[in-house]
Every structure is written in structure tokens, then in C-alpha cells.
């Protein structure tokens, strides 16, 4: 049996049938459909934190919760990721039974749980024989799928965005630039990469504190997001390092865009109590003229950015 051996609780057939009738999944079944299910069902109980179903194990039963709460989790190296919490009237453990694959997740009791365990073969037969049961099952599964879609979208938001500025992060940067390099080779397109770095940011952090530093970074993030074209993407790729990926953009337009961003920042004032001058230096590179893969393009733009720093900051330098 998956997880710990469940504590069986012996109940009479009519008690089990009465409990089954309270589970929404079975609510429209008539007595004829319910009787064989009640015969193949037994009542089980689990203690707090007990594992009821373990990911990867074969599935033998469907569980219908009559009391208590369970957590459905996806275990990972960094800990359990919670997929759902289920309570009285809910069921779990159907997936392994329906597709004959190992358990897709681990299910643990949050507090003492009472459940009904329904054997696999009887459950599968009931799904085949009772269209109303199959329909309720599909309704419940489609609700779960919507929940899972929303979770995936939230997660990808978190994994690709920088929480401080809301801009795309370094991981997204590497992915998107690699995609653009690929497009360039496949379809003969051109794109440019602008790298920007705040001037003297360490001084702001050291003299005014990290809260002010963070406020400046958020403000720069907003300005970059506002002043890039819809087809461009702005990233925060390091502490005070930013990047803008300009699709279908050649050298001259890239230079103009970089000058514009540096100019806008130099003229604007961060919304702080302290009068603070904030400037940026920038370098850029264009693919394929300055390089044909991510590393080359990045290195050329970075070299130009370093030159801008060496030449007095608050300026843009050309590649090479
Ligand atoms: P099964 O794969 O047999 O065992 C683990 C169970 O966790 C699975 O069936 C479902 O009942 C349940 N489960 C898996 N993913 C989710 C989810 N995203 N939301 C709710 N329940 C889930």
C-alpha cells in the first residue's frame, strides 16, 4: 500500500453507503450503483503528518475524505511544494488509478484524517458503468487543472522576474537573448543588446543606506520599462546592472535607444527626500555584426559599457 499502512476502522456496509452518499462525486448514483462501491470500500484513519500517498508508488485505492484535511505536495530538493489542500467531501488518489501510472504527488494528513478507501478495480468499473460518476470526476479534474494552470503561471512569473523592480531577471535574459540569436540565424534577422549600469551606485548604498538604494533601483526599473518599445524587453541582470533587448534593431537605432535611456535617466530625479543625481553608463552590441552567439554579443556590449565607465560615465560607447 502507498505510504504508511492505513489504520483500518471497521464500519458496517450501511454506514459506508451513508458516508459515500455524502461525497459529491457519488451524489447522483442510485442504490444499484452505490452498493458494489460500498462493498469494496473500507474506512481508514491517519494521524497528523502521516503520509497517505507517496509520489512514485503504485496506486491501489481512491481516497474519499470524510473528516480532516490533507496537503497534496510535490516534494523537491528545496522542500515540499504545496499543490492543494483538500477536506471533507474531496477525493484524491484517482490519477494513478485512471492512467495506471505511479502516484503523481505525495498526500499527507494535516490533522487527524478519516477517509474511505475504494479499491482500484471497483472504482474503474464504476467509472465505466456510471456516466454520472464519470461526469463528476471530469468536472473535478478540470477544476484541478485550472488551479494547476494558475499555479504554473504564477511560478513562471516568479522564476522569470526580479522581485525588486518587476523587470525580467537574469535567467529570462539568458533565455530571451539565446532565442533571439536563434531567430537571427534561422531567419536572417538582426537584434541589439544594450547593457546599462548605474554610476556610483555603491556610494548611494554606503552613504544613504540600502532602502534608498532599493528605491533608486525600483525607480530605474520603472523608467526602463516605460521608455522601451513594446517589442523590446528590459531586464535587471545583476545588482545595479540592467539590459534592454531590442528585437529587429540594427546598430544605429540601438545607439539612439541607448542614448535616449541614458539621457532620460540623467534628467529625471528619483522620488526621494534627498536631492540625488543618478546616472547610467551604457554599451551595446548588434547581432550578427558584433558576434554570432550569446557570449560574443554580451562580451562586446560589456566591453563598450566598461569603456563608457572609463571615459567618464553617464554616456554610451559603441562596440569595438
Ligand atoms: P494520484 O496521482 O493517484 O496520487 C496523488 C494524488 O494527488 C493525485 O492522484 C491527485 O488525486 C492529487 N493531486 C495531484 N495533483 C493535484 C493538484 N494539482 N491539485 C489537487 N490534487 C492533486
Image (cartoon, rainbow, N blue to C red):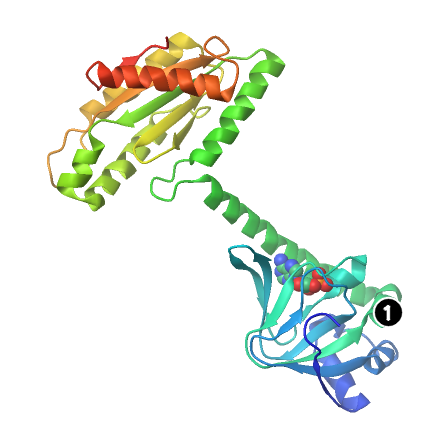
Q: Quadrant of the N terminus?
A: bottom right
| Residue matched to label 1 | 121
- Label 1 residue near ligand 1, CB within 8 Å: no
Image quarter where ligand 1 lies: bottom right
- Residue situated in front as seen by the camera: 161 or 174: 174
Does residue 188 lie above or below 225 as drawn?
above
Does residue 312 lie above or below 14 as drawn?
above
Question: Taking 32 as reference, is 65 left or right?
Answer: left
Residue at 58% across, 79% down: 68
Question: Taking 310 as reference, is 194 left or right?
Answer: right
Residue at 44% across, 26% down: 230
Residue 249, image x and y in percent? 45, 14
Residue 180, image x and y in percent? 53, 21
Residue 295, image x and y in percent? 47, 21
Question: Taking 238 as reference, is 152 left or right?
Answer: right
Residue at 59% across, 81% down: 47
Q: Quadrant of residue 6?
A: bottom right
Q: Quadrant of the C terminus?
A: top left
- Residue situated in front as seen by the camera: 30 or 291: 291
Q: Quadrant of residue 266?
A: top left
Residue 175, image x and y in percent? 52, 30
Residue at 58% across, 63% down: 84
Question: Taking 299 as reference, is 306 left or right?
Answer: left
Amino acid at each position: 500500500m502507498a505510504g504508511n499502512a492505513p489504520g483500518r476502522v471497521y464500519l458496517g456496509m450501511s454506514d459506508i453507503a451513508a458516508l459515500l452518499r455524502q461525497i459529491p462525486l457519488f451524489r447522483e448514483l442510485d442504490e444499484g450503483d452505490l452498493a458494489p462501491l460500498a462493498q469494496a470500500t473500507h474506512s481508514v484513519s491517519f494521524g497528523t503528518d502521516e503520509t497517505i500517498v507517496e509520489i512514485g508508488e503504485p496506486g491501489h485505492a481512491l481516497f474519499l475524505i470524510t473528516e480532516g484535511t490533507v496537503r497534496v505536495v510535490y516534494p523537491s530538493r528545496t522542500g515540499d511544494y504545496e499543490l492543494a489542500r483538500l477536506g471533507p467531501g474531496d477525493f484524491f488518489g484517482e490519477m494513478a488509478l485512471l492512467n495506471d501510472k505511479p502516484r503523481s504527488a505525495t498526500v499527507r494528513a494535516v490533522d487527524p484524517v478519516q477517509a474511505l478507501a475504494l479499491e482500484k478495480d471497483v472504482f474503474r468499473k464504476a467509472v465505466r458503468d456510471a456516466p454520472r460518476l464519470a461526469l463528476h470526476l471530469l468536472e473535478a479534474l478540470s477544476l484541478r487543472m485550472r488551479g494547476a494552470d494558475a499555479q504554473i503561471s504564477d511560478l513562471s512569473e516568479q522564476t522569470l522576474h526580479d522581485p525588486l523592480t518587476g523587470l525580467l531577471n537574469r535567467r529570462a535574459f539568458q533565455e530571451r537573448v539565446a532565442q533571439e540569436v536563434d531567430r537571427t540565424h534561422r531567419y536572417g534577422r538582426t537584434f541589439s543588446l544594450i547593457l546599462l549600469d548605474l554610476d556610483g551606485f555603491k556610494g548611494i548604498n554606503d552613504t544613504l543606506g540600502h532602502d534608498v538604494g532599493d528605491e533608486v533601483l525600483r525607480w530605474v526599473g520603472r523608467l526602463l520599462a516605460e521608455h522601451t518599445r513594446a517589442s523590446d524587453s528590459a531586464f535587471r541582470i545583476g545588482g545595479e546592472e540592467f539590459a534592454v533587448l531590442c528585437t529587429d534593431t540594427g546598430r544605429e537605432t540601438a545607439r539612439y535607444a541607448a542614448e535616449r535611456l541614458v539621457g532620460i535617466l540623467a534628467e529625471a530625479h528619483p522620488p526621494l527626500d534627498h536631492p540625488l543625481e543618478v546616472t547610467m553608463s551604457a554599451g551595446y552590441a548588434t547581432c550578427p555584426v558584433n558576434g554570432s552567439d550569446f557570449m560574443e554579443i554580451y562580451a562586446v556590449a560589456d566591453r563598450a559599457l566598461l569603456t563608457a565607465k572609463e571615459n567618464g560615465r553617464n554616456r554610451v560607447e559603441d562596440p569595438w
